[in-house]
Amino acid sequence: MNFMSTRIITTDVNRLVAFYELVTGIPAVWGNELFAEIPTPVGTLAIGSDKTVPLFGAGSAEPAANRSAILEFLVDDVDAEYRRLGEHLDTVVTEPTTMPWGNRALLFRDPDGNLVNLFTPVSEQARAKFGL
């Protein structure tokens, strides 16, 4: 089994896709006006319209209601990413901080309130974990 993607359901696909294109620097691949994907080398971030929810089962997903999952992206320099993205982030939860497990992390919320973590391994152990 291979983990392939995480899908976010939203009421505004265009807005959320534009945000993640800015964050990742990766252009979206659009399936149609209700669905797009941000493909990365290790997994895909899929963004789907709330209009697709009935296809999975009425009420099975609710846009802008996540309070348990964190989308995490490994970056070369989290401090540089903070400087690049700062003015585009409405809600910064934690400015770049070195965590006890050896990652330097920036946490913020996307336009739908989903928590996003950009991190750079900085300790020897954290760097080794990611083959850096």
Image: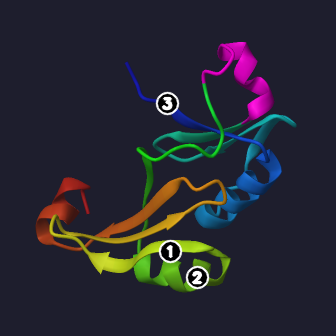
Residue labelled with disc 3 = 4
Callout 2 secondary element: helix
How many other residues sit within 10 Å of disc 2, few (<14), some (14-19) or many (≥20)?
A: some
The quadrant in which the N terminus is found is: top left
Which dot marks residue 86?
Answer: 2
Residue labelled with disc 1 = 92
Q: Position of residue 41 (x, y in %)?
A: 50, 46
Q: Is residue 52 magenta?
A: yes
The quadrant in which the C terminus is found is: bottom left
Span highlighted in magenta in the image: 49-60
In the displayed structure, 107 sits above or below 5; it is below
**Amino acid type, residue under disc 1 in the picture:** Val
**Amino acid type, residue under disc 3 in the picture:** Met
Q: Position of residue 32 (x, y in %)?
A: 85, 33
- The reply to whether dot 2 and dot 1 touch (C-beta < 8 Å) is yes
Query: Disc 2 versus disc 1: distance between alpha carbons?
Result: 8 Å
Query: Disc 1 versus disc 3: distance between alpha carbons?
Result: 28 Å
Q: In the drawing, does residue 55 fall left or right of residue 103?
A: right
Callout 3 secondary element: loop
